[in-house]
Image (tube, rainbow, N blue to C red):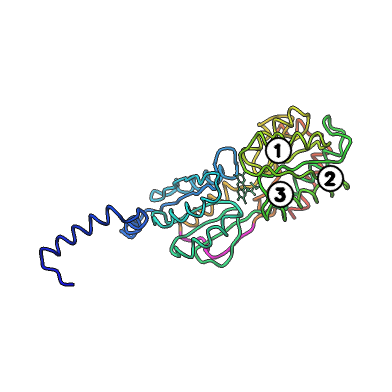
Amino acid sequence: MKFSGTSKRWSAAALTLLLVLTVPAGIAAAGRAEAPDDSYRIAVFVPGVTAGSPIYEMLAEGARRAADEFDHARANIIEGGTNQGEWPGKIASIAAQGDHDLIVTSNPAMPEIVNEVSQRFPDQKFVFMDGYLEGNPSIYTLRYDQYQQAYLAGYFAGLVTSSTMEFAGEQLKIGLVAGQEYPDMNQSILPGYREGAQDAAPGTEVDFRVVGNWYDASRGKELAREIISGGADVLLPISGGANYGVLEAAIEGDAYVIWYDTSGYHEAPGTVIGSTAIMQDTATYETVKAAIEGSLPFGSADKAGLQEGMVTFITDDPLFEEHVPEDIRRALISRMEELAK
Ligand code: RBF
């Protein structure tokens, strides 16, 4: 088609108007990202809600801290919400907008969810904490040794259930309340917890229950009550915000709780008597910092545990010393030292 000078001008104006009015925000924004700009923008996609989930609180904190160290870096925290079916679309729209140099997220399901999105946006870089995927040149992953972490919790639970501590009952029975079932839970966390308990107190049984989401505290409480009335005396909640329901049931039912991922001693002194921890804040900080500096090995997948100082059981809290008998503390510490070798 041939345009006269006038119609050409018109068509250019009309086209601009049409673009402004009809082109999805994503495509328009992709153009913006190509403009010269030396800033480094990070989207932290929290797959769920941050509050009540220490693993996500640490993710956001670590990424923010890394961005704060560079004048040209910014971290933007975006909550994905509790509807997991919406996560791929939400991630895809962040990638489509092209506004972020890096998308950082965390949980073992995310690499698979995002791998397909990544094929559509090959220039978009991703970091997955607490996840594993090797060989995609746009993706770096770091997972924690969840077996070790759960083993430590189980070993401690075994020592307590077989002890003469005030709330330790007759049976060798402990509980685990999970938010949902997923491969890391079924293949690493539950077996680690069970095997740790077996090593400390052979014959210990694990009552395993699933909330079905990561926020329903009243369901968490209901399940914990059932576990306690079945004879368990130590509970390990790994269920995000639902952990607080488990804690309430334990306080009311005279049972003990082990906190996971971060220190929980202050949540309920005397009820929370143990805490495992992962250094997700430090790990996220270091990973994001390396990404900003351009030294992160995208395409590779790392794993970190006790030996790397990324997984531990917190034994230096005064509340741990106050509420746990010395022989149990010593037995746990010496097992942890053996595993860290
Ligand atoms: N852990 C949480 O603490 N809060 C969550 O909202 C949460 N959501 C998850 C969603 C999916 C799909 C999966 C697979 C795991 C989730 N986790 C969550 C578990 C988390 O990744 C980790 O395994 C545990 O926090 C133990 O370290």
Which residue corresponds to the image point at 38% horizontal and 51% vertical from the top-left?
72
On the rendered structure, is 61 left or right of 177?
A: left
Label 3 CA crowd tier, 10 Å (few <14, some 14–19, many 20+): many
Q: Which mark is residue 28?
A: none
- What amino acid is at disc 2? Glu
On the rendered structure, is 99 left or right of 164?
A: left
Of tags 1 and 3, the one toward the viewer is 3
CB within 8 Å, label 3 to label 2: no
Q: Secondary structure at mark 1?
A: loop
- What amino acid is at disc 1? Asp
Q: Percent from the top left, x then y, of residue 29?
A: 34, 55
- What amino acid is at disc 3? Gln
On the rendered structure, is 30 left or right of 213?
A: left
Up the image or down, 47 lies above or below 302; here it is above
Residue bearing mark 2: 205
Residue in front for this viewpoint, 83 or 168: 83
Up the image or down, 288 lies above or below 245; here it is below
> Quick one: quadrant of the N terminus?
bottom left
Residue bearing mark 1: 316
On the rendered structure, is 70 left or right of 139?
A: left
Residue bearing mark 3: 149
Which residue corresponds to the image point at 65% horizontal and 55% vertical from the top-left?
304
What segment carries the magenta color?
A: 294-303
Residue in front for this viewpoint, 168 or 180: 180
Label 2 CA crowd tier, 10 Å (few <14, some 14–19, many 20+): some
Q: Does any atom of ligand 1 lie closer than 8 Å to the CB of label 3?
A: yes
Label located before the other in sequence (2 or 1):
2
